[in-house]
Amino acid sequence: MTGLLFTAAILDLAVVWKLIQLARDPRDLPLRAVTLCLICTDASFALGLDSAARLVDDLTGPGSARLVQNALLLGAVYCLMCFYLFSAEERERAGRRARWEALPLASAVIVLALTTVATPVGLRGREFATADMTATPVALFFMTALLYLIYALAEALWWTWRYARMSLRPLSTGLWLTVGALAGMVVANIGRLGIDVTRWRGAQVPAWLHDGTQGLLALAVPVFIVGVVYSGAAMRMARVRVWLCHRKAYRRLRPLWDALHHAFPQDALSRVPTSGWREFLFLRGTHYRYYRRVIECRDGLVRISPYLAQQGVNDGTPHTSLASHLRHALRAHANGEAASSQAIAVALPDENSLESDVWQLIELSDALKPHARAR
């Protein structure tokens, strides 16, 4: 039961995440295909639960839940094939190929519907493990579904393996997880097909074959879901890490910014402030404030640099001494003392990068912090 709940939770989260992405870019055909794949998988998984299956059968008749569940599962692997088609081929050519690939899907679903009608009412609602495979319509139902699954999953496996070899992390990690999951699904469904044929002929199914296919399928499904969402989640986590670094730097720059902003309020970059909850939901707010604070600190140091030059400050002045000189320079500016026209560069970065520049400002701000005044 715990495993079912875990799989359902992963499916639901994956569907919500992809729907959010699709709402931002509804014309993205590969994203549309993978979103439909996850929706069909989620709905099929839900109908596989006994309570949901009984409810559907009570409303629409015996066997309906089994028919819809398997049709959704076939639709999921079809959408997975379409995802690779739209990713690899030109839009018009991919659309034409997707329409051709819909023919085997439609044929399989028609066979599922016909065999459901031909199955005696008392045998319609049973699942794979308990179905009476000696009844030919029942056996044909499951064999048809499994044959299409094997075909579609093998196609998806080939495309995934091809792209995984050409991709870089974190995308390649997600693709290799998907390769392993799809390979497991193909093997498991071949095993299930062998079980179907064995039961249809009235022979005893080996326990190792039954347990092996069930265990492999139970492992492959959640791994597949993780693989599909891994790259997007990894990039999102990387953005969160950058957001946390910017937020931390923004706060550590506060003492330096306070001192310079008090002396030169006219240098503040005007921008409509955003609320805290919007910054949390939309990470851009913190990035905007971070870059603005860095720029304002640099502008303030350029303005105060003539006063620092009079005190003999140079590029090699340590941050602790520079902080002391900066306090004297700010007092001189506040008192209206004259300054030389010579401007100097202070707290220069060791490397030509924004990160190195910000680190120099942070060290100066930290040196200034014990003497910072309350807001």
Image (cartoon, rainbow, N blue to C red):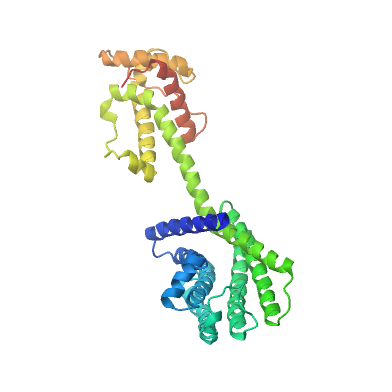
Residue in the picture at 35% in, 35% down: 292
Query: Which one is in front, 221 or 64?
Result: 64
- Name the image quarter holding the C terminus: top left
Q: Nearer the viewer, residue 268 or 34?
A: 34
Of the pair 98 and 229, the residue shown nearer to us:
229
Q: Is residue 200 left or right of residue 152?
A: right
Residue 285 location (% of width, % of height): 35, 41
Image position of 84 (left or right of 293): right
Tell me if residue 129 comes above or below residue 289 in the rendering: below
Question: As drawn, is 5 to the left or to the right of 259?
Answer: right
- Residue 249: image quadrant is top left
Q: Is residue 352 above or below residue 129?
A: above
**How far across and down, in percent of the image, does residue 10 sit?**
51, 56
Residue 146 appearing in the image = yes
| Residue 317 position within the rendered picture, expressed as x and y whole percent measured from the top left | 47, 17
**Relative vertical location of residue 5 with respect to residue 336 in this rendering, above or below:** below
Residue at 43% x, 26% y is 361
Q: Say if residue 175 shows up in the picture.
A: no
Q: Residue furthest front?
A: 122
